[in-house]
Amino acid sequence: MSVVLALVLVTCSTDPNPDGPRVEAAGESLIGELVDEASGLSVFRGIPYAAPPVGSLRWRPPVRHAPRQGLQDATRFPPACPQLQSNPDWYRKVAEGFGRLPDVVPDLERVSEDCLYLNVWSPAPDSGELRPVMVWIHGGGNADGYAHEPNYLGHNLARRGVVVVSIQYRLGPLGFLAHPALSAESERGVSGNYGILDQIAALRWVGRNIEAFGGDPRRITAFGESAGAADIGTLIASPLGRGLFQRAIVQSGGYQLNSTRTLRDEEALGFQIMAALGVEDSPTALRSLRARPWREVVEAASQALADHYWDSVIDGWLLPKPAASIFAAGGQNEVDLLIGSNQNEWFMYISDPATEAGLQASLDENVLKQDHPEALSLLEATAPSGLEARLDRLTGSADFHCPSLAMARAMRRLTDRVFVYRFSRV
């Protein structure tokens, strides 16, 4: 088995090829690249779906992109949203697992705050046939990743007859920071959740424009993995997600049901980041924060909140109440659902060695105190044996498997088009 790990960014001339496939979308003339002349498979890269979230637009909901005049080159992938090097570091661990040297994976170099773009792969944009649409939302803990990672390129999937879209969204503190001053300037009185609002803006763009690429706006599937999957679960729960897609594929998500994080909780963390940046709490604090280079903000957050997981918060608008409560009450949006998890999720995400203390900590976090003896007995009675296997089963069940089943059962009360998978092939 081989794994393609080289993070190669496709670069092309800044002058659009007049012979490339052309699409009129969102008031713009886009020229892409013909991938397969025989079939007409084409790709359009780096299409803006929102205005650059820079300057005064940092930490605000996305603003609609103003159409550009003239032919626009859509042959170059966009830069990744601001992040550190956790993404290539993760790939390096994968490379080592397959016996490769870690230097096979270079650092991520093209990074910019101007990053709200999407990419479209279409089997034949001018065939006149409308095809199903699949919109990929990448994972990475809502802190890392980008839409055109080597294993996220959509041409092979598009060859199966679907229009594939991959989107980017703001990450980490630039995508999820909450602060009382940010809430005060918002007409809704909320802050944070900007990365989820970006996803909503991208899905709305797809709904309005995908027909120009040969896609059917009435057959949109949102699919994602890990944080991308959890975010899709949030969109299913959110009233703002209604009507954005008709189907969802949630891969190793579900854990968003465990979150009870409120806006006030996140606002308190905003003060910690502000202090780490040396910004005093004053009427000019937001101006100072918005003037800081993105790298300073991301690095300060990684130091001040090293163990923090950036996620959607219960703000009364995007999420009126905890997602688990919304699903339990049947208040989620009705969509066809395919959801599932992997057998060894813990091994993929945890690099620390398994310890009895770690197992005990997972029990304390996920199991009621009076149920600890029964849980331990079940873990020990299930094959394979060993500390690592027990910790993997417990953590994987608590974070992925059981929440995914809870989502499936809740959706089953609304529709019979619910499917659950469990991937266990070694």
Image: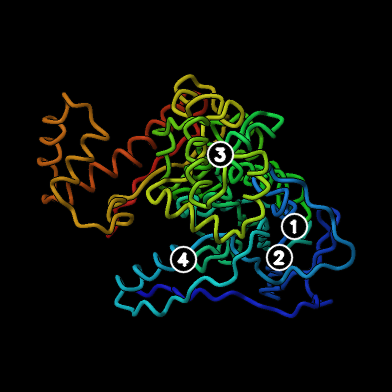
Q: Which of marks 2 and 4 is in front?
A: 4
Name which residue type carries label 1.
Phe
Q: Residues within 10 Å of mark 1 (few under 14, many from 20)?
A: many
Mark 3 element type: loop
Name which residue type carries label 4.
Gln
Residue at which label 3 appears: 178
3 left or right of 190 in image: left
What's the distance in space between the residues labelled 2 and 4, CA to CA? 27 Å
- Say whether disc 2 or disc 3 marks the residue closer to the N-terminus: 2
- Say whether disc 1 or disc 2 marks the residue closer to the N-terminus: 2
Residue at which label 2 appears: 44
Name which residue type carries label 3.
Ala
What's the distance in space between the residues labelled 1 and 4, CA to CA? 34 Å
Q: Quadrant of the N terminus?
A: bottom left
What's the distance in space between the residues labelled 3 and 4, CA to CA? 23 Å
Name which residue type carries label 2.
Phe
Q: Which of marks 1 and 4 is in front?
A: 4
- Residue farthest toward the right in the current orientation of the protein: 69
Q: Residues within 10 Å of mark 3 (few under 14, many from 20)?
A: many
Q: Which of marks 2 and 3 is in front?
A: 3
Residue at which label 4 appears: 85
